[in-house]
Every structure is written in C-alpha cells, then in structure tokens.
C-alpha cells in the first residue's frame, strides 16, 4: 500500500509536528509532501524519509513569507502529484486538505482547525491591515474560503483533534467528523512525592498564551511562578514580573518533567483548540487551573483534575488560585494521572491505524 502524508510546512516544532512524527511511526512506508522544509524542524521519525517539497527551500525569507502566501496555497497544494497512492493523510490547520487524489484513494484529513484567518478570526485579521491591505486580504480570503470548503467535501473522512474542533468543522464545512485526540507522550511521566511551593507556566511566550495575566495575578498574590518557554513576548513579560516570577527559558525534557511533577499546579490561561501542556502536567499527577473554554474543557475535569476560571482576566485567575488553595488537598495525583492516560500516544496510534484500515476495506468492497 502506498501512503502519503501531507503537512503544510516544516518550519517550526509544535503540536502539529509532534502529530506528524507519530503518524510517521504508524505508517513507516509513507512519503511526505510539504511546501517548505527546514531540516532543523523535521520531526525525528520523518528524517531520512522521502520528502517532496515545492523546491523553494533555498529562499532565505521562507520563515516570514510563508504566512503571506495565502493566495497561492490552492495552486501549491494542487500541484503535488499524488497519483497511485492508496492512502493520503493531510495534517491540516491550513488548507493542505486541498490536494488532488485519485478516485480510488482514501483521503483522511486530520484537522487541527479550519483555517482561523478564513473563518472565526477573519475580522481580527482584517483589523490588522490598513485599507488597501484589508481589501486585498478580503478578496483573497473570499476566494480561498470557497476553495477550502469545496476541498473539505472531497475528503473521505475528516478527523477532529477535539470535540471543540468537531463543532467548528460542522459549522464551516457542514460535515461530521470523528474525534481522535492528538498524541501526548506521557510514557516517562511520573508522580513525585515532593511538591514545591511554585505554580508553573509552560509554552511559547506569545500574546495568545496570556502569560502576562499569570504574572500579574502571581504578583498580586505574592505567589511563586516559574515560566518555561521563550518567544517574542519575553522582554515585555520580564518587565511585568515581580520578585516571585522566575523565567527559565527552554529546558531539557527531564527538567521539564521535574518542574511538572513538583509544581503545586499548572496555570493555563489560553483559549486552545486542544492543548497538550495540560495533559502533560496531569500525566505527572498535578492539577491544572485552566481557562474554561475550548480544549481545556475536554482535557481537564473541573474539581477532579483541576479547576476552571471563566474569564481571561487577572481577577478571575486570582480568584481561581485562591479557590484552588482552599481545596488543594482534595486533588489525588494518581487519579489525575489515570485521566491523562486517555490521551496517550498509543491511544492515538491505535485509533488512526484502525480508521485507515476500516476506510480502505470499505473502499475495496464497494
């Protein structure tokens, strides 16, 4: 069986690339198709495999221009030659699902979200341009949105990475989807008998992650906060930080595990479609204080494996921390860890393998 995996680009290392890395293990015979490749960001199990790109990897500006190539995405993805493949899996938060396949090919789209700038965040993106740019973006988005909708109808099966995303797929594509949570590597997670006196934040330091709210909340309460990660917000956040806030940057896997296992709780304020970090913290038996919308409502059980706060405000986070501290002893590490195992990598691998097999068998008997 010939298998192709389509991913928009390998220019960063995030949750989508972790998912592709696991797909590469599930389908060891797969070829890979992508627009751009940076060898430093190729997932470990994809290295050394057959990777077909547009041939523009020599461009020094690819790290900045790839976000602005929206008008060319339909043509770019349709240019890939997928003739003869029995199974195609598109890893899609862009419009990678638009690849053209043979009539007999099974095409599974693993959808992290319909492209945000085309749908639910369209107005926010428009507001970021001056008049001429706004007009150009609106015209481009209108055309790509129509093409993206049509592309979604050609897919054999749409897979959502959460029920939250399944609702979004139903709204924008008018299609049902199967929910398979993305893989979270919790194999080496452990429970530590020693719990420290600090709260923890883990992730990229960008505006949507709302780390500034955590800093201001911990400043007010005088609570110790350790911030793991780096990003363009680093300098601004350091200016906000009081004496109880510690930035440790990027850390090794073993050090991150220790920080997870010994924290009082993970603080997680962003509005995420899924969110791997809360699962990692729970795999170490630690509760999560999370914004109660989006993927957190599926990965965190309120009052069992963590607590929700309902507004992305400093006051709401302060209230949640105080509520947590009043019931902190009721959270049971072993129970929290058992919940996290529902999102383990092996669960994802079994589900994706079975879905592919079922679809191929169904196709062959028609």
Image (tube, rainbow, N blue to C red):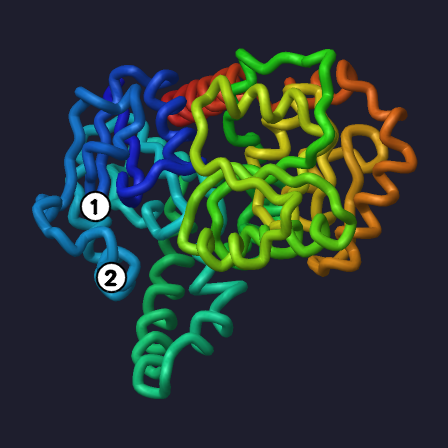
**Vertical placement of 130 versus 236: above or below?**
below
Q: Residue at x 57, y 40 (%)?
A: 246
Query: Looking at the image, can residue 365 be seen?
Result: no
Q: Residue at x 17, y 43 (%)?
A: 80
**Left or right: where does residue 294 sit relative to residue 309?**
left
**Left or right: where does residue 136 sit relative to residue 16?**
left
Farthest-out residue, front: 243
Q: Residues within 10 Å of mark 1 (few under 14, many from 20)?
A: many
Residue 204: where, in percent of width, then height?
A: 47, 45
Query: Looking at the image, can residue 164 be seen?
Result: yes
List the residue tagged with mark 1: 35
**Left or right: where does residue 266 sit relative to residue 181?**
right
Residue 215: where, in percent of width, then height?
A: 64, 51
- CB-based contact (under 8 Å), mark 1 and mark 2: yes
List the residue tagged with mark 2: 69
Indicate which disc, 1 or 2, sits on the residue closer to the N terminus.
1
Q: CA distance from mark 1 to mark 2?
A: 11 Å
At numbered mark 1, what does the secondary structure look like: helix, strand or loop? loop
Q: Quadrant of the N terminus?
A: top left
């Amino acid at each position: 069986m010939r298998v192709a995996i389509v991913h928009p680009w390998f220019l960063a290392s995030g949750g989508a690339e972790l998912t592709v890395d696991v797909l590469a293990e599930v389908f060891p015979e797969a070829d890979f198709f992508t627009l751009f490749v940076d060898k430093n960001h190729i997932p470990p199990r994809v290295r050394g495999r057959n990777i077909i790109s547009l041939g523009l990897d020599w461009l020094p500006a690819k790290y900045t221009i790839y976000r602005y190539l929206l008008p060319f995405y339909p043509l770019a993805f349709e240019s890939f030659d997928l003739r003869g493949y029995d199974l195609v899996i598109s890893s899609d938060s862009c419009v990678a699902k638009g690849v053209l396949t043979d009539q007999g090919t099974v095409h599974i789209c693993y959808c992290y979200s319909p492209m945000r700038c085309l749908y639910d965040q369209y107005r926010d993106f428009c507001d970021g341009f001056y008049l001429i740019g706004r007009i150009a973006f609106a015209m481009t988005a209108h055309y790509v949105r129509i093409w993206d909708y049509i592309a979604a109808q050609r897919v054999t099966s749409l897979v959502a990475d959460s029920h939250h995303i399944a609702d979004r797929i139903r709204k924008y594509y008018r299609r049902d989807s199967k929910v398979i949570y993305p893989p979270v590597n919790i194999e080496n997670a452990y429970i530590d008998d020693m719990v420290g006196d600090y709260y923890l934040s883990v992730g990229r330091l960008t505006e949507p992650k709302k780390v500034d709210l955590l800093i201001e909340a911990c400043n007010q309460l005088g609570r110790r906060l350790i911030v793991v990660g780096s990003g363009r917000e680093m300098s601004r956040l350091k200016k906000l930080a009081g004496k109880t806030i510690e930035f440790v940057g990027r850390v090794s896997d073993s050090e991150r595990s220790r920080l997870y296992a010994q924290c009082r709780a993970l603080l997680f304020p962003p509005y995420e479609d899924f969110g791997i970090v809360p699962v990692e913290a729970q795999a170490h038996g630690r509760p999560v204080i999370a914004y109660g919308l989006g993927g957190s409502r599926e990965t965190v059980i309120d009052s069992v494996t963590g607590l929700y706060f309902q507004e992305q405000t400093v006051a709401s986070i302060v209230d949640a921390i105080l509520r947590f501290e009043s019931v902190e002893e009721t959270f049971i590490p072993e129970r929290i860890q058992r919940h996290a195992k529902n999102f383990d990598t092996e669960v994802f691998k079994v589900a994706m393998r079975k879905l592919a097999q079922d679809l191929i068998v169904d196709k062959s008997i028609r």
